Amino acid sequence: MGQSDQDLSRLEANRMAATIAAGSLLVLVAIAVAYRYGLFDELLPAAGFAAEDLPMLLLVPLLVLVLVIWSWSRILSFFE
């Protein structure tokens, strides 16, 4: 028999959560490697960021943090 729309939606949400959780681990490893080899010294401006960049510099990490928290809470709920 076919699965209901609610079951398919739940499966898609679980796949997205697993993808975001795995991606967050890969990004964390990439950041650690970049920091270890000093790659951030070339990327960050010496005088700091411009004031116009501040909203984007705050909004993007906040959005990423919310997605990572959501995905990890979804992954960890499997073990309850």
Image (cartoon, grey):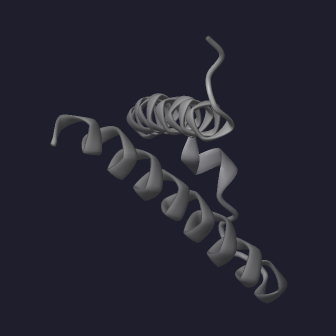
The quarter of the rendered structure image containing the C terminus is: top left
Query: For this rendering, which residue is in front, 75 or 49?
Result: 75
Residue displayed at 75% across by 74% down: 56
Give the vertical position of 69 relative to 34 (above or below). Answer: below
Residue displayed at 41% across by 30% down: 29
Q: Position of residue 78 (x, y in %)?
A: 27, 36
Query: For this rendering, which residue is in front, 63 or 71?
Result: 71
Which corner quadrant of the image does residue 11 belong to? top right
Q: Is residue 48 visible?
A: no
Query: For this rendering, which residue is in front, 68 or 10?
Result: 10
Q: Position of residue 49 (x, y in %)?
A: 71, 75
Residue displayed at 61% across by 41% down: 6
Query: For this rendering, which residue is in front, 39 or 18?
Result: 18
Which corner quadrant of the image does residue 16 belong to? top right
Residue displayed at 43% across by 40% down: 35
Taking 53 as reference, is 22 left or right? left
Q: Which residue is the extreme one toward the left? A: 80
Q: Position of residue 45 (x, y in %)?
A: 70, 64
Q: Which residue is the extreme one toward the front? A: 1
Which corner quadrant of the image does residue 1 belong to? top right
Taking 15 as reference, is 68 left or right? left
Q: Is residue 65 visible?
A: yes
Q: Which residue is the extreme one toward the bottom? A: 51
Q: Position of residue 70 (x, y in %)?
A: 45, 56
